[in-house]
Image (spheres, helix red, strand yellow):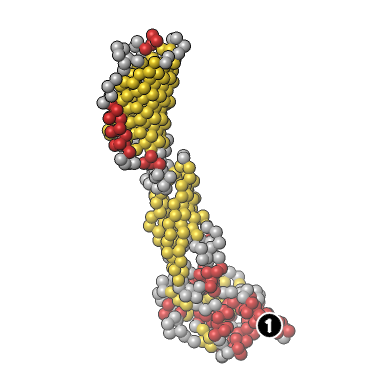
Amino acid sequence: MKKSPFIALVFLALGAALATSQGLCISVMPAFELPLAGSADLFTNGAGAELLAVYGPGDKSGLRLLGGAGYRSINSQADSRLSLLSLSGGGGYQLALGKLGLLNADLRGGAYFGSYNGAQALDASAALDLGLRIPVSPALSLGLGATGTIFFAKPEPAYSGLGVNMVASFALGAAATSMKPLLQIENPRFQPIFPVFFKWYDSNPAGSLVLVNKEKRTINNVRASILIRDFMDTPRVFAELASLAPGESKEVPVTALLDDKVLSVTESTKVAAEITVSYDLADGTRSVMRVETLRVLDRNAMTWDDDRRAASFVTARDPAILALSKAVAAGVRDRKSVGGDLELQIAMGLYQSLGLYGMKYVIDPSSSYADFSKTGSAIDYLQFPRQTLGYKSGDCDDLSILYASLLESIGIEAAFITVPGHIFVAFALSSSPEEIDRMTSRPDRYIIDSGKVFVPVEATLFSKGFSAAWA
């Protein structure tokens, strides 16, 4: 038999398909065979399968090339079997039907080798394919189809039939990218981290970012976490979304569970924050990570846009503070005046002890409360009480924080009072407003708030004594 020109077509189609992996897929088509026309008189039924390499437009409409191999085993009326091994190649058209899937019609030609009752033949073959596939994932589509085939011979075709087949198509071009996450982390915005507020960031945002679903399908169980390795032991999940539709975006706040190691930062520094987002698709779980640079300020940094933040520097449980406050309180209790308010006497003792200690009011020209309180966003430098004890000096905010820490460490409620350009302290007495009215002729020297009596004290006059500071 002369060599079939279709053999050249087979290798041409395969070469075109393998020339690039873009749009290349492998289709497996197991089939149930039904003989047609004259073959129905000789054969009953059979089974077969085709393995095709297809180069086409992916999930869009367009022309496609294909080539591959097939095998069929057909039962004859005489209880014998016809075996057919074929190579074929050709082309066709694919029509995208949206959610309904992909419809294809292909025409192939090639050559086959047949065997029946010891006789063998080599000749040409032709096939017409019709199929409908539904994408299950970017890499996999499943469907059903029909293939009509003719295996030529002389004087009559060796076999003609219709194969009803299942189709499983695996896209090689998409295989490398189907597991690639397409969710995007966009527009990350972070404020500088203030170490003294490290517990605050557990429930309040340090910044925000936008999650954008670039997948072609809805993603589910979206979980976003952050890890700052220098100052966090484990990642912190800051956002959980049930789903995001294709193209949908969502802005989420970023919280972080920082540990107290951040309080060791004495100079402003930059750290890497690893943001990881995982989500589920029908064919598995994806995750994407983005690294952002955060600025961590030094442990003494603060802004005065919210003056309540100064309370974060009050360290009533610091051993150095407790040692001083408890020693003074014990001495006052031993010498307590009969009929006097104990809290007032202890507060006086603490104030006098700081004067004897040599505590001085020193304005820092580069970081004074008077200047920085005028600009809420300016970053001020506040001393921790332990530092102020060591330096024996501080600005009005430093000295107020120290005095408030000493009061709070022995159970005396303290408060900060801010006025333009200045901050001072007030502490609560155990006496009621009625008792104060009976005990003093100067009730205007006290502050009554929420049924409590507070004594206001200027924290910069330790050298002049408590009376001057109260006055």
Identity of the residue drawn at 43% across and 45% down = 179
Q: Is residue 21 visible?
A: yes
Viewer-nearest residue: 68 or 122 = 122
Q: How many marks?
A: 1
Residue at horizontal 28%, vertical 24%?
3
SS under mark 1: helix
Say which of 159 and 218 sits in front: 159
Tell me: 408 left or right of 266.
right
- Dot 1: few (<14), some (14–19), or many (≥20) neighbours within 10 Å? few
| Residue 104 spot, x, y in % from top left | 32, 28
Residue 101 lies, with reference to residue 248, above or below; the image says: above
Question: From the viewer's perspective, is 37 left or right of 396?
Answer: left
Quadrant for residue 442, please give it. bottom right
Q: Give coordinates of residue 456: x percent, y percent.
A: 56, 80
Whether residue 318 sits left or right of residue 7 in the image: it is: right
Q: Residue furthest left?
A: 5
Residue 352, x across and y down, in percent: 61, 87
**What percent of the width, then of the height, locates residue 139?**
40, 39
Position of the N terminus, as image quadrant, is top left
Can residue 162 be seen at all in this image of the molecule?
A: no
| Front residue of this view, candidates 147 and 444 | 147
Foreground residue, 51 or 251? Answer: 51
Q: Where does label 1 land, which residue?
A: 327
**Residue at (34, 34) in percent of width and height:** 54
Residue shown at 38%/26% (left/top)? 70
Where on the picture, by quarter, is residue 411? bottom right
Q: Is residue 62 above or below residue 320?
A: above
Quadrant of the rendering where the C terminus is positioned: bottom right
Q: Amino acid at mark 1?
A: Ala
